[in-house]
Image (cartoon, grey):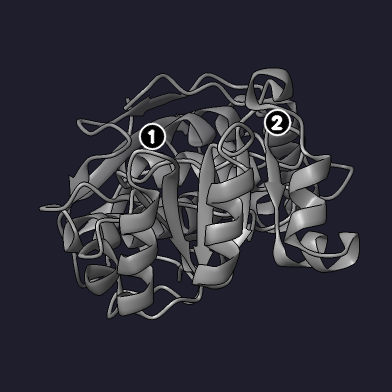
């Protein structure tokens, strides 16, 4: 896995999640009643109770969650993000005082469960087409505030990140084309690739639009996004683009259709469900021992 550094939005999200659970007064009535003056160190473990293997993602987030508590703690894992975790395996051990461990538990697990689910779903797609050259892309269909973390989870699962947001690529979608007055008008307004300074992607809905883009957009377009095409039409469009544009397939791609998409020879397949439909995996924290 590449090095990962949480950004400002990630840190704000973690702080917001802790405040949501503990309030602005940072208080857990149950824990503080039972462990009012307890300073003894305890060990807890995070285990996978998921019935099938999962891809680990979120250890850096867990570290930051724990760092919000003014106590010494240690998180130990024999795994790293991106590793495959078998059912029943011990994901990590956390050592710290009982109050901090109990107050952090739910927030920490909520982050891990969601990020592991995205990484696991991504791995399923990547494994389906591992004999092809097609790369699996994420989209902007992310949970508000979670985008940087969710796209990191896609990387952990072996996928590839698309643009992060609206500011790091020019991507002309069907709505842009219709509002500006057609694909010819959109192409006319685009700068040359060398002047754009960012990747330029044009959505294509049919082979006629592609032919117009090939004729007028070679100097302006880096990649065409072939949207909601049947495999036969997609394959024909990919063939026309060879040596001219990168190609990307999109539109309701799932685990049942991804292989047919990859067989067309398309360079990328963007899959919204990596982030918008991944279910949580089953992780649990339980006490191990009281430290002497």
At x 45%, y 71%, the residue is 279
* 1 and 2 marks in contact (CB < 8 Å): no
- Which circle, 1 or 2, is nearer the viewer? 2
Return the x and y of residue 25 as percentages of the image width and height. 88, 42
Q: Which residue is denoted by mark 1 in the rendering?
A: 94
Q: Secondary structure at mark 2?
A: helix
**Residue 84 visible in this rendered orientation of the protein:** yes
At x 72%, y 51%, the residue is 28
Q: Which residue is denoted by mark 2 in the rendering?
A: 11
**Above or below 149: residue 125:** below
**Residue 105 visible in this rendered orientation of the protein:** no
Identify which residue, 200 or 16, lies in the foreground. Answer: 200
**Apparent side of residue 137 relative to residue 89 in the rendered image (left or right):** right
Distance (Cα) linking label 1 and label 2: 21 Å
Identify which residue, 112 or 95, lies in the foreground. Answer: 112
Return the x and y of residue 164 as percentages of the image width and height. 63, 39
**Above or below 270: residue 161:** above
Q: Secondary structure at mark 1?
A: strand
**In what quadrant of the picture does the C terminus appear?**
top left
């Amino acid at each position: 896995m590449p090095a990962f550094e949480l950004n400002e939005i990630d840190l704000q999200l973690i702080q917001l999640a802790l405040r949501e659970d503990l309030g602005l007064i940072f208080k857990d009535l149950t824990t503080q009643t039972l462990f009012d003056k307890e300073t003894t160190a305890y060990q807890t473990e995070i285990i996978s109770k998921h019935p099938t293997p999962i891809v680990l993602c979120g250890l850096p987030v867990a570290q930051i969650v724990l760092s919000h508590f003014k106590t010494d703690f240690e998180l130990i894992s024999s795994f790293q993000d991106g590793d495959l975790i078998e059912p029943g395996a011990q994901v990590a051990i956390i050592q710290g005082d009982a109050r901090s461990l109990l107050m952090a538990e739910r927030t920490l697990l909520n982050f891990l469960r969601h990020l592991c689910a995205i990484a696991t779903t991504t791995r399923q797609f990547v494994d389906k087409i591992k004999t092809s050259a097609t790369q699996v892309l994420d989209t902007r269909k992310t949970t508000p505030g979670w985008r940087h973390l969710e796209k990191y989870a896609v990387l952990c699962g072996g996928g590839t990140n698309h643009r992060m947001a609206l500011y790091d690529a020019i991507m002309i979608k069907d709505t842009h084309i219709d509002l500006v007055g057609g694909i010819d008008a959109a192409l006319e307004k685009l700068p040359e690739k060398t002047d754009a300074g960012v990747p330029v992607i044009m959505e294509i809905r049919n082979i006629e639009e592609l032919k117009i883009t090939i004729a007028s957009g070679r100097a302006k377009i880096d990649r065409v996004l072939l949207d909601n095409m049947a495999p036969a039409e997609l394959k024909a469009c990919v063939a026309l683009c060879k040596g001219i544009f990168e190609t990307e397939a999109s539109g309701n791609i799932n685990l049942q259709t991804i292989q047919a998409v990859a067989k067309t020879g398309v360079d990328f397949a963007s899959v919204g469900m990596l982030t918008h439909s991944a279910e949580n995996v089953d992780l649990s924290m339980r006490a191990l021992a009281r430290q002497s």
